[in-house]
Image (cartoon, rainbow, N blue to C red):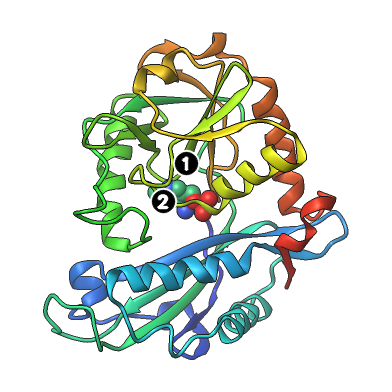
Amino acid sequence: MSKMYEKVFFEDEIINSEQANLSIASSAVLYGLSVYTVFPLSIGADGQRYAFRLQEHYTRLINSAKIIGIDTFADKWSYESFSNAVKQVIQANIVSNDVYIRVTVHVNENIAGTRSRGLKTTLSIFIYDAIPILSPDGCRLKTSVWRRIPDYAIPSRAKVNGAYVNSVLAKQDAIDSGYDDCIFLDVNGHVCELSAANIFIVRDGVLITPDSTSDLLEGINRRSMIEIAREDLGIEVIERSIDLTELYIADEVFTTGTSANISPIIEVDARDIADRKIGPITKKLQKIHHDMRHGSYESKMNWLTEL
Ligand code: PMP
């Protein structure tokens, strides 16, 4: 487990993590009624601390709250006040290695019943060591018996805490079966994503990923890699439905995500993917992804905020 840093932002101030508590009667605790985002803060070769796509993380947080009907957050927290709170929590701790920063909007009203509007919200921000959840050297996936929550039940597009029970079920099932992570299928049997990462395949030099209506989280790394592949590398990228069996015969399969990074998939459901070798596109994107977050990928320096 990762180390959590001691000073956190909670409500409107910096306090010690053990003092940042929610009531057992709050909607956040009772119903998992919180939305969140998590982004990396990476130490560049120049010693600077770089936050990755802070504006996009703020926008996704606002959109998650909007989808769920949590309506007291956006009015109070502008991008400026949000990024200022992030800055405060970084300054309150000593951050000298790569970390993740988790920002959560909790519905913090007691015994409010199963509703979302007009309720008090509390912002929390904490920092923890950036330990990737998947190996950069190759991962083994198992198709989950649990299906991805559809947009008409709990939208995967909204990063809502309670929905992560779906991910926990599928990830634990994969681990129990001796695999590293799961592949989620939607109710029609198409590929969605992993428990906490998006998925890409390569077929005949074309990069393919499930389109954003495939019951997945619209990952910020997913979008970033699509843009880099198209604009910087001239690789064709198609967003469309993917059949499970396309994974089995793909030339390359890899993940994208804040804590999954670009991780090569070498086995799916006891089938070797491309002789368990890491493919050239995966390798190239893996390096770019690392450099991009650490301030050494020239064309996307505008995606970074020095904090
Ligand atoms: N899907 C799910 C379910 C996730 O939890 C994550 C991690 N946040 C991702 C995809 C990847 O999203 P991002 O690239 O924004 O980290």
Residue at image location 54% in from the left, 74% down from the top = 6
Q: Residue 149, image x and y in percent?
A: 24, 47
Residue 230 shown left or right of residue 147 in the figure = right
Residue 78 at least partly seen: yes
Residue 54 shown left or right of residue 307 in the figure = left
The amino acid marked with disc number 1 is Asn
What residue sits right under mark 1 in the picture?
Answer: 198
Q: Is residue 133 above or below residue 272?
A: below
Pointer 2 or 1: first along the chain: 1
Residue 68: quarter of image:
bottom left
Residue at image location 57% in from the left, 80% down from the top = 79
Structural distance between the alpha carbons of marks 2 and 1: 8 Å
Specify the farthest residue to the top.
Answer: 275
179 and 19: which is toward the camera: 179
Residue 2 shown left or right of residue 64 in the figure = right
- The secondary element bearing badge 2 is classed as loop
* Residue 217 badge: 2
Q: Is mark 2 within 8 Å of ligand 1?
A: yes
Looking at the image, do the residues carrying marks 2 and 1 touch, with CB atoms under 8 Å apart? yes
- Quarter of the figure that contains the C terminus: bottom right
Residue 11: quarter of image:
bottom left
Q: Is mark 1 within 8 Å of ligand 1?
A: yes
Determine crowd level at label 2: few under 14, some 14-19, many 20+ residues with C-alpha closer than 10 A: many
Q: Is residue 197 above or below residue 124?
A: above
Total numbered labels placed on residues in the image: 2
Residue at image location 50% in from the left, 74% down from the top = 125
